[in-house]
Every structure is written in C-alpha cells, then in structure tokens.
Image (cartoon, rainbow, N blue to C red):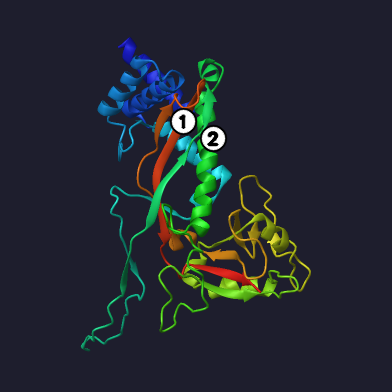
Amino acid sequence: KCGELQDRIEEIETKASRPGRLAGSGDREAREHTNLFTAWMRNPRHPEANRKLAEFEMNAKSVTIASAEGGGHAVPEEIGRQIREFQLKYSPVRSLVRVTQAGTSDIKRLIDIGGAESGWRSETGTVTETNTPQLREIAPTGGEIYAYPKASNWSLEDVFFNVEDWLVRSVAKAFAKDEGAAVVSGNGTNKPTGMLNTTPVTTADDATVKRAAAAYQYILSGDNSPASVDADALRDLVYTLNSAYRAGASWAMNSNTVAQVSKLKDTTNQYLWQQSLAAGQPSTLLGFPVSVLEDMPDPVGGAFAVAFGNFDEGYELIDRTDIRITLDQVTTPGMTKFYVRKRVYGHVMNNDAIKFLKLL
C-alpha cells in the first residue's frame, strides 16, 4: 500500500510540473524511457545502458517505433515533444500548415479538383444526374531530415551538463531551418515539394482549364521603381481568396517584406499593420494574423514575396517515422556525434486555398 501511494504521489507531482504527460502506467513508462535514454546518451559505451534501453523499447507499451531502419534508438516522446515545441519557436511553419502522420512509405492522396455539383427539384420532380467530382492522385515527396550535433565526452560525463536540453535545442534549430525551406521552395528531391516549386500562375479558381495540381494563383502588386508591395494589391489578394477559406486565413512573408508592409497606410493615414500587444500573439495585417517565414522570397522584382490563405487547407506536411538517434564515438576522438533523423514528406494539397502576390 505504501509503495502504491508513493507511486501515485510521484505521478501527481510529475503531472503538475510537466503538463501534457500521459497518465497512469503510461506516464511511468514515459518517465522511465526518458531516464534510460538520457543515461545511454551520457555513457553509450556502457553495454548495460545500451542493453537496458533496447529491452525497454522492445517491451514497453508506450513506445511505438514506425521503422527501425538505420538502427539506433527511438527518441522518447517527452524529448520528441520538446523538439517539436522548440521547432515552433524557431519556425512557425508547423503551426501554419497541416501536419499528419503516415504509417506506410506508400503515401498517396486523392485531391478533389472539380467539386460535386448539386441541383433543385420539386416534391415530385425528377432527379438529373450531376457531374462527378474530378479526383487527382498525388504522391507526396520526401526524405530523411537529420541533425548531426556533437559534444565532447568530457561534457557528457559532467553531471551539470544538461544533455537533454542541449540535444533538444540543437535538433529543433536544424529541423526548423530545413523544414521551413522545404515547405516554401523544396524541389521534391529527397525532401518535400514546396509551395513555390511549381511557379504560381494567374489562372483563377473557376477557370474552365484548371491549374496544375501544385500551382497556386498569383496577382500582381506595385511598380518596378523600385519593386514594392502595394496596399491596394494586399486588399485584392484577400478577396481573390474564396470566402470559404478566409475564416482561417493568415499571411506569410519574411522579415524584409514585413519591414516594407508594416509601413503601409490607408487613405486615412492609418497603418494597415497592427502590432501585437500581447506576447505570443501574432501581429495582424488587414485583420488577419501574420506568420514570419524567413524562407519566403525577399521583396524584389518578380518575387512571390507575400502569401495569403488557409495554409492548413493548402499544404500538408507528413511525418512518416518517429525520431530516431544513433551515436558515433569513432570518427572524432574525444567527441560523441548524435545522428538524429526522421522521414518527412510534403505536398500542395489544395491550390485554391493559398494565393500569392508577385512584385513587378
């Protein structure tokens, strides 16, 4: 009884200090996984540390490993969650687009490019067959994203060195940088296919001849002396987007474009840009939130410098595997390298849901 009570007290204390952890036996397993994993990182040469971690991953119900390719160990969910949280700090792309999980490498998506039609009839009227929706099959592209930080063996042996926090921050920065670039302009070779990989076109959503599946629509802005973002064009971009997507819409641009756009005023000399007054809340432009994606193009002639739309509808990022890690203590004497990786895919999902502004 005393032992059970002590376990229960430990569970409550852990949940209070680290919200979001799993409850019950799953929480104890998650905590044990993190402890074994951290002990292994500090002393991977110790055969007992490696054996205990391998046995735990094989038997624990709370550990799910989508793929063991390349060996190594699964990163505990607690550490994986911290990596994802820090990724959002370094790049907002994962909070902007749709993020899903896939259990197979044979990933396919069926995209509705026509939409179903409807009709009207009276109580006794006949039913006329309507057009069938057009479906296009898309195979998202992707590859393995990895980080390869290293630490000295002396630092790993120092009990005051927080190896977990160091690993989380190092990996999150690397993943955020590469994922942000891939979502914007990835070429689809061993990485996601980005939003701008297929050049946007002027073809409207309701045109008879549809745009290519991965091509968004753009409108023009400003003049070329010098290239600039025009306030009226921003308003036009908002209303070029179908009203069905405006409810969840936001802007995306890099810091150089923000510096230009934030100075724009309307005819009453009021700024279109409203700076956020609360920490953690985005600034707004014409009433819609702004995400700063540094991988968006700079505001120069010919650039698609501004995006506006419902990114959750318009682009999908797919996690194929859990994060895995392998340690290398051979190639650089005195140092331990941490090879951390996972497989990620991405593709344009609905090319009506996002619009771009092209500068003259």
How many C-alpha atoms fall within 10 Å of the one at disc 1: few (<14), some, or many (≥20)?
A: many
Q: Earlier in the sequence, mark 2 or mark 1?
A: 2
Q: Position of residue 222 (x, y in %)?
A: 69, 74
Residue at (37% x, 58% y) in the render: 140
Residue at (49% x, 35% y) in the render: 148
- In this rendered view, identify the residue nearer to me: 70 or 79: 70
Q: Is residue 137 left or right of residue 178?
A: left
Q: Is residue 269 left or right of residue 45?
A: right
Task: Identify the residue under disc 1.
Answer: 338
* Residue found at the far bottom of this picture: 125
Question: The residue under label 2 is which amino acid type?
Answer: Ser
* Residue found at the far right of this picture: 269
The relative height of residue 140 versus residue 150 in the rendered view (above or below) is: below
Question: The residue under label 1 is which amino acid type?
Answer: Phe
Q: Position of residue 247 (x, y in %)?
A: 51, 64
Give the number of the disc on residue 170. Answer: 2
Res 302 → quadrant:
bottom right
The relative height of residue 297 versus residue 121 in the rendered view (above or below) is: above
Q: Position of residue 306 (x, y in %)?
A: 60, 65
Q: Secondary structure at mark 1?
A: strand
- Circles 2 and 1: CB distance less than 8 Å? yes
Badge nearest the viewer, 2 or 1: 1
Give the number of the disc on residue 307. Answer: none
